Amino acid sequence: MSNSFNLNQQLVLVTGGARGLGEQLVRAYLREGANVVINYLTSADAANKLVAEAPDQAFAIQADVSDQAAVNAMFAKAREHFGCPVTTVVNNALPKFSFNGDARPNADQLSWQHIHQQLEGVVGGALYTTQAALPGMREVGFGRIINIGTNLFQNPVVPYHDYTAGKAALLSLTRTLSNDLGPDNITVNMVSGGLLRTTDASASTPEEVFDYIAASTPLRRVTTPAEFADATLFFASPWSRSVTGQNLVVDGGLVKG
């Protein structure tokens, strides 16, 4: 078995793939010739519209990634539809969240329920998709798991305590899983962005925040979802076959490492 597959040989599953960043992730992998499973929770119309653009390559499946049984069923449906196991998982799904610092709970208001909701969706979801993918990845001797993170670890400028805690835990899981799964030729990496212009989640972000970030960034602009999505392709490609347990920050140079 080859230790790497070209993108056009891969079956990629993108969680939360119907809207926002997820849509751009789906488009990036479709553009490179991969077959793509578009996971969605409530955005059926958007998911089906994407499938209609590439009916031979794309397939939409509804599942709550925090529900292990639903995730397992989704992987079975994907394999049945495409006739092969999922080789690549992009963990993008985000529990309901609005990127508006003024509306987020501060230190006095933060509850464990806020944090638990993010841990359940972000970390639980990634754990369940990884576990569901392992049998098929081991079968073909190849696997790529790409987790979506945030640059707020390094630059905690807004009180997204719950979101950042969930993503930080996901980074830890990324690194421990990379060590555990390396012998199976399965790499596990993270790609972390800052505020993206514009997704549903960032729609409530004030314009002056975008302007401030652009002015503070070496590229003098805010990264777009399409630009961010392209960077994830590296971790699925043969070029990254010796890279695992890493966190690549894609935010126009705002945060270093």
Image (spheres, rainbow, N blue to C red):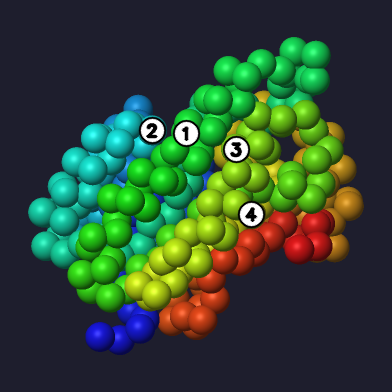
Label 2 vs 3, first from the N-terminus? 2
> Which residue is at a point 62% across and 19% down the rendered structure image?
112
Q: Read off the residue under disc 2.
A: 66
Amino acid residing under circle 3: Gly
For residue 166, the mark is 3
Which of the 4 image quarters holds residue 180? bottom left
Q: Read off the residue under disc 1.
A: 121
Up-down relation of residue 15 to residue 179 (above or below):
above
| Image spot of residue 240 (x, y percent) | 51, 78
Q: Read off the residue under disc 4.
A: 192
For this view, does 174 lie left or right of residue 161?
left
Amino acid residing under circle 1: Gly
Label 2 vs 1, first from the N-terminus? 2
| Image spot of residue 212 (x, y percent) | 87, 43
Compute the Cα span from label 1 to label 3. 8 Å
Badge count = 4
> Which residue is at a point 76% across and 63% down the rendered structure image?
257
Q: Residues within 10 Å of mark 2 (few under 14, many from 20)?
A: many
Q: How crowded is mark 3: few (under 14 residues within 10 Å), some or many (20 or more)?
A: many
Compute the Cα span from label 2 to label 1. 5 Å
